[in-house]
Every structure is written in structure tokens, then in C-alpha cells.
Amino acid sequence: MPTVSVGRDLLFQALGRTYTQDEFDELCFEFGIELDDVTTEKAIIRKEKHLKEEDETGGDEEIIYKIDVPANRYDLLCLEGLVQSLRIFCGVDSVPNYKLAGISKESMLKMHVKPETSLIRPYVVCAVLRGITFDEARYNSFIDLQDKLHQNICRRRTLVAIGTHDLDTVDGPFTYEALPPSEIEFKPLKQVETFRADKLMEFYKSDLKLKKFLHIIEDSPVFPVIYDRNRTVLSLPPIINGAHSAISLKTKNVFIECTATDLTKAKIVLNTMVTMFSVYCERKFEVEPVEVTYSDGKSYICPELSPYDMKVSLSYINRIAGVSLEANKVAGLLNKMQLHVEQSVSEDNECTFIVSVPPTRSDVLHACDVAEDVAIAYGFNKIPKQILASLKPLPLNQFSDLIRTEIALCGYTEVLTWILCSYKENFPMLNRKDDKSTAVIIGNPRSADFEVVRSSLMAGILKTAAHNKDHPKPIKIFEVGDVTVLDELKDVGASNHRQLAALYCGATSGFELIHGLVDRIMEVTGTSFVLAGNNTGYCIELSDEPEFLSGRQANIIYKGKRIGTFGIVHPQVLENFDIPDPCSFVELNIESLL
């Protein structure tokens, strides 16, 4: 969940009242967010620089609230959105009516999109905030919201990049183009000299903040760029804005452009920016539209601030939320969550709501989202608990739990190990050879520790024993978990198998100890021991697996099919995992026993 840091005093001032920490924590809980931490600016600096309490730091002692918000509530990523939502939730304010400025199409600013942009970032949406008033706190919040959106819905600027400009320093109409980097030259933000775009890429490779975005366009034959009428560069998305149009505390008219590879997300980002900060405009909640035109004649006006309607029945809301509420109560709860509703009656006399979803609530996509908002506003703690009659565990999971209980009663401790492991652990360290038809190999592993999806539980069990080799002996551990093997019969090319593995590690570890555990497992599953060739029960036969000591290992044959192997772990394998004591081990497929 994203975390939003806001000054407590500024927050309470905007909310119109003060709260104790417990009161505000309770308000957050009721609204569906969480007060994660209470700190100060000095404490944050100390933590970032790894300083001690007595060390001198900058910053002040203002109380900072760190609030966790849902990842899809982009309107809560800034102080303005938090305050507006909480005031509406508490009944202090009504839902704002966002609107476009009433200007003719001929008077609108234009953004002309060149066809070459389709090679790299084909979409752009724009808007203007007229008569905005910034102070230091508002300005910082404006910049911080852009950063939060870039990290969240914009996916580190790969899907959408936001550019904000002082409209009074540039002249429309604007053009969005894609040109070879050698043809683009401008002075970037916070720089004093002019750079050519290809040279700028080299310059920013040493910049801690911007270097992580260079890969998005640096290998492209053309770079996206936005010009005004005088060929002044506004921005080189998604890297940097031009210094000429930089906004400041004195800026009164802000031009916002969002270039993107995903038009839907670009519209959400633009709506979030303009709705959150139109509150500071001379005409509150009014946004000036911009017309975007393409060379093929297609055009659209943005932003789109009209609410969209959704039809949801009262019975559906009550069923999904697990409550039984009257229509007027549900309508009041939805109003608290910024959703305006109108009641109607369908042809079959069922109560239905026409829910108007404002541009700030891009997370409401389906009727179930409306039901969720009702549940939040009503209070999850007030919803009566129910046990669904149809809710039953899967037979395999139920059987796995029973097996776990029985092995624990035999004195073994359960462990949970990683599903991913290194290639070396899955094969060479177990004396096994890769036949290229068993293990699922990770295509682009993040580290050498996670290269393969485990095809056996053995490596994880042995690593656990190795990390605990100084513990009192014997070490008796087990795991019930899934392994993955290649399977051409499956759509995804692989299948999971539920396995049981157990290890006995100690000076007295022997074949008979692990054999006894195998017999106990078979006994509790109702499987009798039979002679070889009899397919009604289980038997054991000599095996020759490289991870076990020769002559001290056996296959488990269940109804004529091999389901596992047990024996004394090979000394070379123990040495590979740095385990000094002898170990006996069993691994078998428990799905076969169902």
C-alpha cells in the first residue's frame, strides 16, 4: 500500500478540527485507511542517514503522520485528496461538482500530435488550471503528487509521464512530436546550459533520480518532445521538463500534459491532478479543457470530468456486503464515499440505484466496488459474521493438514522453505543431473538464489538443517508443500505436485528411523504393507538415486506405482550443504494417497 506523509497540524487545519492520535487512528480505520506511523521530520532524516538520537540533523520537530492508503485510490495520494475525502465522509462537505470551463472549441488551447509519436509514446492528454494560487505547502504537495503517481499507476513513467508548465511563459498551440535525439536541443530543468537530447542521456546516467528512467527511450531512434508555437521545448517525456516553462510559487496558470503508452491510465492521471488542485483555482473545481488533434483528423477534448452512471440493485449490495439495509441508509453511506445516488424501481419492483461515479473515483469499475464502499462506510466490524455453508476445504488441503498433524505427533517440526531455489541447489549439490525435462527454469532471475522452481523439497530441507546444525540433536523436521515439474499436457507447460519430505539428522540417524516414519504414514492413511507385485497396498524396493547412499535407500511403491524414495543421504550431498551429521530422508507424493 502506498504511504502518504502529511504534517499533522496542516492536516487538522484543513479538516477544520483537531483530533487526538487515537481519535484520528479510529477515523482512518472507519474510512478504510491506516495511520501507519507518527514521526517527525528530524526523525525521518536521522533514519535516512542512519544517525543516532544525539546527532545533529536538519529539519524541524513538526509531527508527521504516515498514512497507508489503498493502491487504487489515487485521489488519496496527497493532502488535498485525503482532506476532501475525510470531510465528505464526516458529513462536513458535499461531493464537489467538477466542471470544464465554458469556452468555445475555437478558443481552446490545441495540442497537435505528429504521426511519428506512434513509434514510441502515441498518446497525450492535457488540461489547464487557471488562476491557481500556490503557497509553499501547496506547491510541495503538487510536486509530491506527481512523484506518487509516477511510482504508482504510471509504473515509473513507463506507462504515463506527467509534465507541468507555467502557461504564461509559453505560447500555444503546442505540438507533440518524435524526432531523432540529435535534432532536439534545449535547457533542461535545474540546468544552466543547453543540451542536445542524446548528450543529455549521457549526462543523466550519473543522476541518482533520473537515471532509472533513461532506459524507457534511450535506445529508440526517436525521442518524444513537446514544443510550443515558438519551438520552445516544454518537455522531453518521460525524462525531464524544460527550464523555460518551470513552475514556481508565483505561477498562476498551469499547463499539464501527460504523455503515455496507455490512454486510459493517462486520462486517470490527468483527472487526478486537475481535480485535486482545482480547489486552489480562482474558480473552484473548474478546469480549462484542451483539444488534442491527430494528423489523421481524429481529435478529442480532455479532461473528461463528467461522472459516469452505474446501475446497482439494493439486493446485490446487501448480498455482497453481508448486511440487510434499507435503501435510504445505503444511499447515505454511498454519499459518504463520494458516490451520488438516485433511487429507482425496476420493472420487477426491485429497488435499484443509479450511482454517479465522480472523476476522482477511478477505482470504482464494477457493482462490487459500490458494495465494498457501502461495507466500508457501514463499518466492517458491524457486519455480522457468517460461515458459508458451501465453504469447505479442498480434499488435498484437508488431507495435507491431517498428514501434518500425524507427523508432528511423531516428534517432527514443520518448516516452510522457498519455492524458488538456485540451479546449483536443485541439481549439482544433490548429485543430480538436469535432464532438461523436469525443472522449470526462471527466464530472468533477480538473483542466483532464485533460478529454478523447486522440483524436490530436499534442497530446502537440507538448507534448513545446515542453518541449524548447532542446535541440539537430533534435528527432526518435515515439510508438506508443492513442487513444480514440466508437463507438456498442461496449458502452461508445467504442473504442481503436493509432496511430503522429512529429515532425521543426528549421530544415530539410520535407515530404520526414516523407514519407521514411512510405515506410520502408510498406517494412518489405511494402506497395508504387501509383497512386491501385489497392487493393493504398498511395498519397498531397492533404488539407485544419486542423492542417497548406495544400498541404503529404497523406492516406495504404492499400488504398483513409485511415489517416493527414502534412505541415508549421501555423504557428498551432506558435505555440499555443510552438514556434519548423518541424515536420513524421505520424500513422497501425497496426492497419490488420496
Image: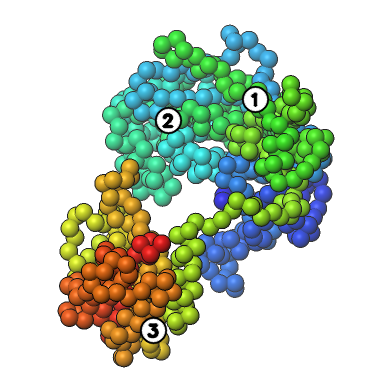
Q: Which residue is mark 3?
A: 475
Q: Which residue is mark 1?
A: 308
Q: Are marks 3 and 1 in contact (CB under 8 Å)?
A: no
Task: Determine the image quadrant of residue 20.
Answer: bottom right
> Which sits earlier in the primary sequence, circle 3 or circle 1?
1
Using the image as rendered, state which of residue 432 and residue 15 is in the foreground. 432
**Could you tell me which residue is drawn at 48 percent across and 38 percent down?**
154
Q: Residues within 10 Å of mark 3 (few under 14, many from 20)?
A: many
In the rendered image, residue 101, in percent from the top left (x then y), is placed at 67, 18
- Label 2 – label 3 distance at C-alpha: 55 Å
Residue 339 vertical position relative to residue 467 in the rendered view, above or below: above
Residue 540 vertical position relative to residue 469 in the rendered view, above or below: above
Q: Are marks 2 and 1 in contact (CB under 8 Å)?
A: no
Q: Which mark is residue 261?
A: 2
In the rendered image, residue 479, in percent from the top left (x then y), is placed at 40, 70
Q: Are marks 2 and 3 in contact (CB under 8 Å)?
A: no
In what element is the residue under mark 1? strand
- Select label 3 or label 1 by which is in front: 3
- Label 2 – label 1 distance at C-alpha: 24 Å
Residue type at the position of mark 2: Thr
In what element is the residue under mark 3? strand
Using the image as rendered, state which of residue 98 and residue 396 is in the foreground. 396
Single out the residue that lies furthest toward the bottom.
508
Q: Residues within 10 Å of mark 1 (few under 14, many from 20)?
A: few
In what element is the residue under mark 2? loop
In the rendered image, residue 270, in percent from the top left (x then y), is placed at 56, 30
Residue type at the position of mark 3: Ile
Residue type at the position of mark 1: Tyr
